[in-house]
Image: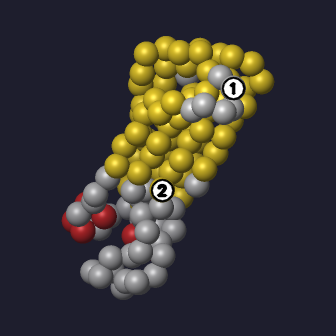
Amino acid sequence: MVATIDFGQAISIDNVSIGYLSNTAVWIFPPSAMVIRASLDDDKYEIIGSKKWRFSQEELEGPFVKREEFTFKSQKIRYLNIEVSNYGIVPDWHAAAGHKGWMFVDEILIN
């Protein structure tokens, strides 16, 4: 999933958070990575936050909702680009092994 937000003018931000759901019983897996980029001109983007995950089978057994938060030094931006990567192929231990899992991402909060 990729989302680019144009604020229409430069604004100051210091925090971005993104929520997601994991419920592997119904093929919904958490993201594997998130990258947050910022720009003033929609041409040159700078990475202002990123995270990668590897979840164990045990961590994925029950459903959960989580919010990932990225806090950084306040900066002026006009454009915010958010890339959230799908978990990918369902692992061998799952009944749907070999298929692509779903990814459910909800609110993007920007402060």
The reply, left or right, for residue 26 in relation to residue 81 is: left
Residue 76 spot, x, y in % from top left = 59, 15
- Residue at 30 percent across and 64 percent down: it is 60
Above or below, 38 relative to 85? above
Above or below, 48 relative to 55? above
The reply, left or right, for residue 29 in relation to residue 13 is: left
Q: CA distance from mark 1 to mark 2?
A: 25 Å
On the image, numbered disc 1 is attached to which residue? Answer: 41
- Residue at 24 percent across and 68 percent down: it is 57
- Residue at 66 percent across and 40 percent down: it is 4
| Number of numbered markers | 2
Tell me the quarter of the picture where residue 5 sits.
Answer: top right
- Tell me the SS state at disc 1: loop
Above or below, 34 relative to 89? above
Residue 63 spot, x, y in % from top left = 38, 61
Residue 27 visible in the displayed image: no
- Residue at 58 percent across and 55 percent down: it is 1
Image quarter where the C terminus lies is: top right
The reply, left or right, for residue 92 in relation to residue 68 is: left
Residue 72 visible in the displayed image: yes
